[in-house]
Image (cartoon, rainbow, N blue to C red):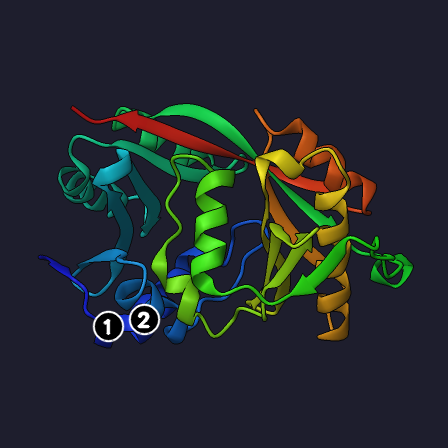
Amino acid sequence: MIRTATPQDAPLLARLHDRFRSGWPDFQPESSEGVESAITGDGMVYLLLEDRAAVCLYADHRHNYGYLDFPYASLEDAPTLITAALPELAGLRVECPLPAERVWEAEELKRHGFEPGRTQRRMIQRDLEAVATPVLPASAELFQPTPDEIESLHDLTFTGHTKLPGWRSNPEMFPPIGLKLNGEFVGYALTSSHGGWHWLTELGVHPEARRQGTGRLLTLMALGQLREAGATEVHLYVNDDHDQQATRLYESTGFKTHRLTTRFVKLQS
């Protein structure tokens, strides 16, 4: 029997996540609070199979985007959960991220009509002590932008990708870093702590402020913020197939590639 999980199922879902993901590369324990926030704030849907396995999905019909997190399940239960999840994502372009090391999971996605898509690069900065505090130009001003200001600039920076609302109340987020040049809001950095790791979660730069050192300045400020919060290393993800400029930016601030993840894609009719 498959049922839709409620916020009260968050502890169970966190345990299932940790049980089935403990063998994955870069495993991160999940928290009940994180799952509950995903359900109540981000609109994530979890389907439970007799309380022994689960799958997470998200549908954004406005942007024709669907997200499927590979089931927290055994080889025997995964096909049932994927089959149950796909009708919930009907008519959408569905993505499911998967580390390259996960062989049987990749074969299972292919059996359900998924094909390998874009590659996502995970990068880590492990030498925070070497990161110098940047000197702000005279025209620059740091400030803490409001969530509305961040989402407006996000929509300019990441065209076609809506920011999930749950980030506003996510207790794992640090105060946002905003940058103004000549009084204009041109960029922001979002940082967080999850599963014992520190993250540069998102970097947004106004299209007209790119290639001017804005992204590098914000990256260095974010690394400084996380260092002060006790971080010894910082993680991030970048889309490898179409964002080589961002990869070079992060490499210039001490990040090194750790591993690649493939986002499997299925075009639902």
- Residue extending farthest to the left is 1
Q: Are marks 2 and 1 in contact (CB under 8 Å)?
A: yes
Q: Residue at 66%, 38% (x, y): give it.
A: 209
Measured as percent of width and height from the top left, residue 80 is found at 18, 43
23 with respect to 108 (left or right): right
- Work out which quarter of the rendered image holds the N terminus and state it: bottom left
Q: Residue at 19%, 44% (x, y): give it.
A: 85
Depth order, front residue of 237/159: 159
Label 1 CA crowd tier, 10 Å (few <14, some 14–19, many 20+): some
Q: Is residue 59 above or below residue 29?
A: above
Q: Which mark is residue 36?
A: 2
Label 2 CA crowd tier, 10 Å (few <14, some 14–19, many 20+): many
- Work out which quarter of the rendered image holds the C terminus and state it: top left
Q: Quadrant of residue 123?
A: top right
Q: Quadrant of residue 233?
A: bottom right
User: Which amino acid type is shown beneath numbered disc 1?
Assistant: Pro
